[in-house]
Amino acid sequence: MTPDKRLDQIEPVLADVALKTDRLIESNGQIFDVATRADTNARIAAKGIADLTIEMRQQFGKHQNQIDQLRTEMNEQFGQVTSQFEQVAVEFAQIDNRFAQVDNRFNQLTSDQAELRQEMQNGFQEVNQKFTQVAQTQEQILTLLLDRLK
């Protein structure tokens, strides 16, 4: 084979290799460009998140005193409400105690009333017995008088 023929055979292969190499270089450039943009976008996003975090911390720091003050006020109010409930509970206990005393008085009155009724019944029985005795005595006297008169 002559060098010209050989060159004719090699030239199309070299042209094809050169074309493919150019395409690889171009696609590598595009990949590098995309990677650079992605890196830039990631940096922008990271900076945005960092800035937002810093801003949130600053805002929270500014309002932390107000939040602490509100928390303290709420705790004080809950303490007052708890104290008021405890006072109400004590007052209810006193009322319950008074009701118990009234119940005891009613029970004592009921007992006293039952005793009085019993005493009255006993008294009425005694009076009835005395009336019966008087009636019997009167009968006896009448019988004696009638016997003497006869």
Image (tube, rainbow, N blue to C red):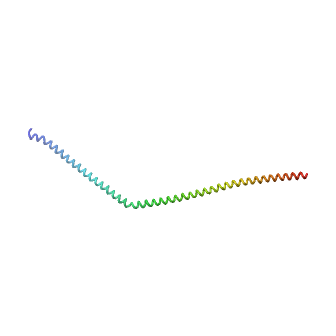
Q: Residue furthest right?
A: 150
Residue 89's x, y, as percent?
54, 57
Look at the image and tell me in which quarter the N terminus lies.
Answer: top left
Please identify the quarter of the rendering in which residue 120 is found: bottom right
Residue at 52 percent of width and 58 percent of height: 86
Residue at 35 percent of width and 58 percent of height: 57
Residue 43's x, y, as percent?
28, 54
Please identify the quarter of the rendering in which residue 62 is found: bottom left
Q: Is residue 121 found left or right of 146 in the rendered image?
A: left
Q: Is residue 71 found left or right of 133 in the rendered image?
A: left
Q: Residue furthest top?
A: 1
Residue at 18 percent of width and 45 percent of height: 21
133 in relation to 65, above or below: above
Residue 102's x, y, as percent?
62, 57
Q: Is residue 32 found left or right of 87 in the rendered image?
A: left
Residue at 65 percent of width and 55 percent of height: 108
Q: Is residue 123 found left or right of 1 in the rendered image?
A: right
1 in relation to 106, above or below: above
Report how many numbered discs are placed on residues in the image: 0
